[in-house]
Image (spheres, grey):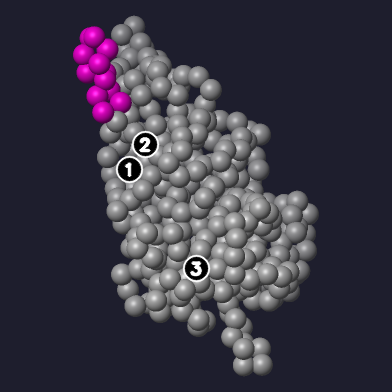
Amino acid sequence: MKNKISFFITVITLSVIFNLLTQSSSEAAATGCVKTDDGTAIKVTAQANMFVLAGTSTDVDQCSQEPDEYKVKFYKVALCTADPYKGAADPDFSSCSDIFNNTDGVDKIIKPNTETNLLEGDLVLPRGTYPYLVVMVNNHLNIKHKQKYVLASDGTTDATFFGNSSGSGTYCWTIPAVTTYTNYIADGNGNNWPTSYNSAHGVTLLESGAGTTNARLKCGDVNAANMDFATEIIDDLANDPDIEDFQAKFDYYDAETETGVTGIEIAQNLLQDNNVTLATTGDNAKRLLSHFKYTSPVVISGNTVGFKMRFSTYSAVSIDMSSQTVEEVFSMWGAKVGADPFMVQVQTKERRSRRGRTGDWR
């Protein structure tokens, strides 16, 4: 009996600080829009659907990109031996071992190719096999991004976009503005949120679209000194919020098409700010809980000496544009940026010999 108890309470201390980093994927280009050969500018055509999805002939008015900076408030990260996702019921964390848990939340900025520490010090985890990971964040996601645009006709001529208040040019960039995934504002009209939404979330939701009032991006011909974080709230998980009731769950799906990462399925919940209970309205939906199911489970053994999480953000910003024609004059506008899903991969490193040599990250 003594040996059996010891087996279950044995833990390991990982010698490498837990890190966040973004990764690139060979499939990233296939999920974005057509760009110049050097990847610095997106090609556009002066029409309502100004972008073309890479590898297709499909014209669209939004384009997925990797943001310059992605700021997220983390509340909980945990590995689980059983599936904590329960659909329209509260998630079950009883099989989960916390990597990070802070009821007040901690803001972290994720940048491409940059490691960011989430933990200060070593990480202690029980040995075991973990097919599941949960990541709980504030559903107010913050994005900072600047993008250049050129005409598709020759791939070099500067395109012209118009932005908020005044100004136009070949670049558009983010400024402080709060929008929603559903594009709803809080005026109580039609499908929009009730006016109580703003006070419940401590924000003022803004419309987005064409025109100097509704364009939420700044545009110009030079680097933006006033670039700042825009906020997108993931406010509803319904497939079609215009015809469906509020949903606090989105069932597992293979996100390879959207993120380029294979072997991982993702499901999501919206939670209340007690970090446990499923949201019932837009007003009390304050947390976004992402569930990751791995084809190859994470294994923590007595030889595990390193642990990393890789956040794939290459398609985590949706650049949404709009257009209008006034007195036969056509113009393109920087409507807003939206938040798309991020994917999380876990890597571990094993000790290979008694001399302390370690293997590669896997």
Q: Earlier in the sequence, mark 3 or mark 2?
A: 3
Q: Secondary structure at mark 1?
A: strand
Question: Can I make out residue 212 in this image?
Answer: yes
Q: Secondary structure at mark 3?
A: strand
What residue range appears in magenta?
A: 349-360
Dividing the picture into quadrants, the one containing residue 309 is top left
Residue sitting nearer the eye, 30 or 278: 30
Question: What amino acid type is highlighted by mark number 3?
Answer: Tyr
Question: What amino acid type is highlighted by mark number 2?
Answer: Val
Q: Earlier in the sequence, mark 3 or mark 1?
A: 3
Q: Residue furthest left?
A: 353
Question: What amino acid type is highlighted by mark number 1?
Answer: Tyr
Across and down, in percent, residue 223 comes to 59, 56
Q: Quadrant of the N terminus?
A: top left
Identify the mark at residue 346; answer none if there is no mark. 2
Indicate left or right for 203 with 259 as reference: right
Answer few, some or many: residues within 10 Å of disc 3's Cα (few below 14, many 20 plus, some between 14 and 19).
many
Magenta stretch: includes residue 221: no
Dividing the picture into quadrants, the one containing residue 155 is bottom left
Residue under numbered circle 1? 294
Viewer-nearest of discs 1 and 2: 2
